[in-house]
Image (cartoon, rainbow, N blue to C red):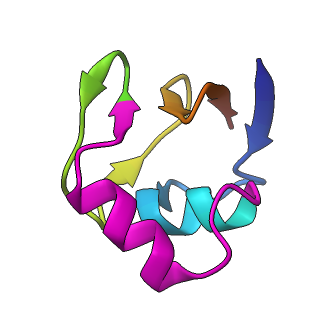
Amino acid sequence: MEIFNLDNHPHVELCDLLKFQGWCESGGGAKEVIAEGRVKVDGKVETRKRCKIVADQVVEFNGGKVMVKP
């Protein structure tokens, strides 16, 4: 499992996290896969593109997992 650090930010938007992780080439691509129901947050499908991901949440996409840390 990979780690994503918030670096003292309170949250990161789901579409931005996918882009920052390199799982999607663009924000538009990230929004598309989220809308298709291909992304999970804490084990549940998440379709809100701008969902705020906070510390200790786990995001899954296409076989990859990332744990968000403060």
Q: Point out the stretch of residues depicted in magenta.
A: 21-40
Q: How many marks?
A: 0
Q: Residue 31: within the magenta? A: yes
Asked if 53 appears above or below 68 in the picture, the reply is: below
Q: In the image shown, does 52 or 48 lie closer to the viewer?
A: 48
Specify the quadrant that holds the N terminus: top right
Residue 47: x percent and y percent? 19, 51
Instruction: Judge from the rendering whether residue 21 lies leftward or rightward of residue 26; answer left or right.
Output: right
Q: In the image shown, does 43 or 8 lie closer to the viewer?
A: 43
Q: In the image shown, does 32 or 9 lie closer to the viewer?
A: 32
Residue 38: x percent and y percent? 34, 42
Residue 39 image-quadrant placement: top left
Residue at 52 percent of width and 54 percent of height: 10
Residue 68 image-quadrant placement: top right
Residue at 68 percent of width and 75 percent of height: 25
Specify the quadrant that holds the C terminus: top right
Residue at 74 percent of width and 54 percent of height: 21
Q: In the image shown, does 35 or 56 lie closer to the viewer?
A: 35
Residue at 77 percent of width and 44 percent of height: 5
Residue 53: x percent and y percent? 43, 46
Instruction: Judge from the rendering whether residue 19 lies leftward or rightward of residue 50; answer left or right.
Output: right
Q: Residue 9: within the magenta? A: no
Instruction: Judge from the rendering whether residue 21 lies leftward or rightward of residue 50; answer left or right.
Output: right
Residue 60: x percent and y percent? 51, 30
